[in-house]
Image: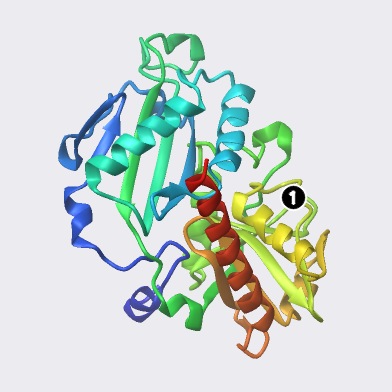
Amino acid sequence: MNTIDRIDSRTTHDADEDIRNRDIKIYVNGEIVPRDEAKVSVYDSGFMLGDGMWEGMRLYKGKWAFFDEHMDRFFDSCKAVSLDVGTDRAGILDALTRTAEANGMTDDVHCRLMLTRGVKARPFQHPRLSRSGPTLVIIMEHSKPVDSLQGKGIRLATVAQVRGLPMSQDAKYNSHSKLNCVIAALQAEQAGADEALMLDPHGFVNTTNACNFFIVRRGAVWTSTGDYCMNGVTRAKVIEVCRDNGIPVLEKNFSLYEAYGADEAFLTGTFGAQTPVASIDGKPIGDGTRPVMARIRQLYKELVERNVSDQSHD
């Protein structure tokens, strides 16, 4: 990749630079410490093996959008891999609240909540070697998606790396073990694209390395079956607003043929909400007007506002 390509490269997690993030405070196992002092052991299961689960959430007007849905996924994932969270939902919310207050954060905030199996007695794989309890880390940053993404869109490249079958590593886990997606991102970058479009084990269009993927054809919204991708909270909310507002939406198998010929395509994720796709494998998608995505984006924004407002009255 040449210098021009690198300068022009963008991702769905591009954010306006905020110098306040240099001095944020981070939650580490009950303590809130300055960024430069936030550390975990080299014997930690997350560092050593990627043995852990995480959630990405956004803070709107002092409230965590779709908190219950994020906690459903987080606690279900931890239970599935016998990872003791060490607290309940109220305890997680308290830790989040303390961290936000310590940073004076209320809006345009992105959080990465991370839990690992904790410090190992010896540097080997078996979970029984993690004997001291879990490690919980919370990083919050002032983070607002760059406006330019809504105009330019993301360039995708289809890659060889796939999201695998559930018996290898179920893509529904939001796990620290992200090497599969990292490899896909590298393959896309080396192809001159911004993100990777990953297929499922049967060759159908699935997801990107970082986000869920949607297309629009003749007014109908399509996304994958969900069998081989992270079942994102934002993905579920987009499907919900479509169904509630008369927008046809289908969870189905489809190939690159349908993706290349789509009228619109967009990505969904907690950070960027809905991000347009400009091209796939060098092929422009639609005419750039994206009316269906624009309507979904507005409906989603209204849904977030209602969710935050409902929490305020609890």
Position of 299 compared to 226: left or right? left
| Residue 252, x across and y down, in percent | 83, 59
Q: Residue under circle 1?
A: 226
Q: Is residue 40 above or below residue 5?
A: above
Please name whichever residue, 233 or 170, is drawn nearer the observer in this view of the structure.
Answer: 233
Residue 14 image-quadrant placement: bottom left
Please give the name of the residue rendered at 41% of the width and 67% of the height, measured from the top-left corner: 145
Please give the name of the residue rendered at 56% of the width and 47% of the height, measured from the top-left corner: 66
Q: Determine the secondary structure under disc 1.
A: loop
Residue 32 image-quadrant placement: top left
Please name whichever residue, 103 or 187, is drawn nearer the observer in this view of the structure.
Answer: 103
Badge 1: few (under 14), some or many (20 or more) residues near its Cα, within 10 Å?
A: some
Q: Is residue 266 above or below residue 91?
A: below
Visible residue check, residue 267: yes
Q: Quadrant of the N terminus?
A: bottom left
Position of 279 compared to 33: left or right? right
| Residue 44, x across and y down, in percent | 35, 23
Position of 127 compared to 107: left or right? right
Please give the name of the residue rendered at 64% of the width and 47% of the height, measured from the top-left corner: 230
